[in-house]
Structure formats: C-alpha cells, structure tokens
Image (cartoon, rainbow, N blue to C red):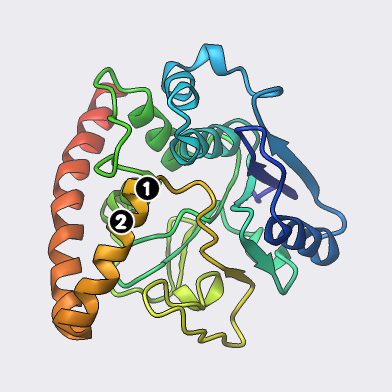
C-alpha cells in the first residue's frame, strides 16, 4: 500500500517578508514533524514560465490563485502534505500518512484547501491538475473556481456523503473540520477537540479586496439569515458548483480512457 511521504509543502510567492503568524506556524511544523522535509515553493524554484495559468496569476499579483495551482502541482509531482502558512500544527502528522489522500472539511458542504495530503501521482490530484490545465482558462476573480470547489466535486466522484463527518473510501480520507479547521470561519469561535491536528487561523494574507468583501458579505448574510437558513443557502451554492464541476470531471475522465 502506498503511503504519503514525509514532505510538507508550502507556497510563498510575491516576495514579501513572512508575517509573524507564518513564522510561528512554520516553526510549529518543525517542532511537531522534525523528521519531515519542508519545501517552500516560490518564483525561484517553480518554473512559472512553463505554466500559463501561474504566469498570468503572478502577473496580476493574484497570489492566492497562483498558490492554488502550485500546491496541486507539488502534491502531484512529489506527494506529501500541503499546508497554508497560517496553519499551526499541534500534533505530529504521522497518523495521516497511511492514507493515499486526506482532505478536511471546512464546513458541512466544502473541503478546505489549507491542509491536503496525497501520495505522488494520485489519480484524484491528477484529475484536479488536469482541470487547471483545461483549455478553457479560469478567470482570476472572486468567481474563480478554486481548490475548495474542485475538492468538493471530487467528494461526489468518491461518493462521500455531504455531512462534514470523517469518512473513508478507496484510501481517500475525508476528515471532520475539527482536525484542521477548529475555528469557525464565520464566527471565529474555536472548537478544538482531541482530534485536532492543526489550527487554520484564516490569516488571509493573500486575499484580494474583492475576496475580502465577499467574505464579509457572507458573514453579514449569516447574521441576517441565521445559522440554519444560511446553511440552506450555502448548500444551494455548493450544489451549484458540484453540478458544474462533476460534469467537467466526468468529461476529463472520459478523455483519459
């Protein structure tokens, strides 16, 4: 059985100095995973000119989108674990290495993209990578279908139940949100449990003004609509993306046969 290699990948593009939060989080990786190789991907060691999507994102200073693509490439090419630089580890990651892929729910309907693990050349990661290389370019704005949406579509391909609970199929492990997202991204209330391996702090250092406005709109909507009505609205939005991306993935899988 394949296992995830002891490599932690992170992306730092744009040339800015790392924040104190980023330094603190990286130090936590070194503390809890001292025998892991930690690789920073940036403009110097990633061949930007060979990927038109990354090249365009860098040109437009859309660091978040560039990071989305680079993280998938790193997992496809080397295998290992990708972490955002605002994820603090509170435990060793070894317990997750026996899976071929692990993802973590950020909410009931969405997977987060701040912590992803995979073996080298896993079909799921390969499929996500192919979508990024698809002939139809992805627009770099708040409507861009990021890793969050890609991962959510894969949930359906691997027949995960949309309930936000830990489940496993075909060596792909979906973790409940308390493993890496114990902080509610809307209320910022912490609900850490004995399962918690890492804490995503939602630093948002790469968010554009448009993305920040969209996030604030979602927070305001939740306050106005209430938790349960907002959850229904979130489910409708998630299902919309799932339908679109599920068709695209099925098409890509058909092209590979």
Q: Is residue 121 left or right of residue 237?
A: right
In the image, residue 142 lies at what x, y percent? 28, 44
Asked which quadrant contains residue 244, the reply is: top left
Of residues 143 and 134, the one drawn nearer to the viewer in this rendering: 143
Return the mark for residue 213: 2
Disc 1/disc 2 C-alpha distance (Å) = 6 Å
Instruction: Tell which of 151 and 68 is nearer to you.
Output: 68
Seen at 60% across and 44% down, the residue is 119
Q: Position of residue 253 (x, y in %)?
A: 28, 31
Compared with 14, 148 (above or below) is below
224 to the left or right of 211: left
Which disc is residue 49 wearing? none
- Mark 1 and mark 2 in contact? Answer it, CB < 8 Å: yes
| Category of crowding for the residue at label 1, using alpha-carbon neighbours closer than 10 angstroms: few (below 14), some (14–19), many (at least 20) | few
Q: Quadrant of the C terminus?
A: top left
The residue singled out by tag 1 in the image is 209
Q: Which x, y percent locates residue 64?
A: 47, 41
Q: Secondary structure at mark 2?
A: helix
Asked whether 37 or 95 is in front, the reply is 37
- In the displayed structure, 45 sits above or below 4; it is above
> How many residues crowd mark 2 within 10 Å: few (<14), some (14–19), many (20+)?
few
């Amino acid at each position: 059985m394949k296992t995830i290699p002891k490599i932690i990948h992170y992306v730092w593009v744009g040339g800015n100095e790392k924040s104190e939060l980023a330094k603190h989080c990286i130090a936590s990786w070194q503390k809890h995973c001292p025998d892991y190789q930690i690789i920073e991907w940036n403009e110097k060691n990633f061949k930007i000119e060979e990927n038109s999507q990354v090249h365009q994102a860098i040109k437009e200073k859309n660091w978040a989108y560039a990071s989305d693509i680079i993280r998938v490439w790193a997992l496809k090419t080397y295998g290992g674990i990708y972490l955002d630089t605002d994820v603090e580890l509170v435990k060793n990651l070894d317990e997750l290495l026996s899976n071929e892929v692990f993802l973590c729910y950020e909410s009931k309907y969405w997977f987060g993209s701040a912590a992803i693990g995979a073996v080298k050349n896993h079909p799921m990661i390969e499929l996500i990578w192919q979508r990024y290389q698809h002939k139809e370019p992805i627009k770099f704005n708040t409507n861009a279908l990021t890793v969050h949406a890609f991962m959510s579509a894969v949930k359906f391909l691997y027949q995960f139940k949309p309930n936000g609970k830990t489940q496993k199929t075909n060596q792909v492990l979906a973790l409940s949100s308390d493993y890496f997202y114990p902080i509610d991204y809307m209320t910022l209330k912490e609900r850490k449990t004995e399962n918690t391996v890492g804490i995503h702090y939602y630093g948002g250092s790469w968010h554009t003004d448009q993305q920040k406005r969209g996030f604030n709109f979602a927070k305001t909507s939740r306050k106005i609509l209430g938790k349960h009505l907002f959850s229904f609205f979130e489910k409708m939005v998630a299902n919309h993306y799932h339908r679109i991306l599920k068709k695209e993935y099925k098409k890509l899988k058909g092209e590979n046969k």
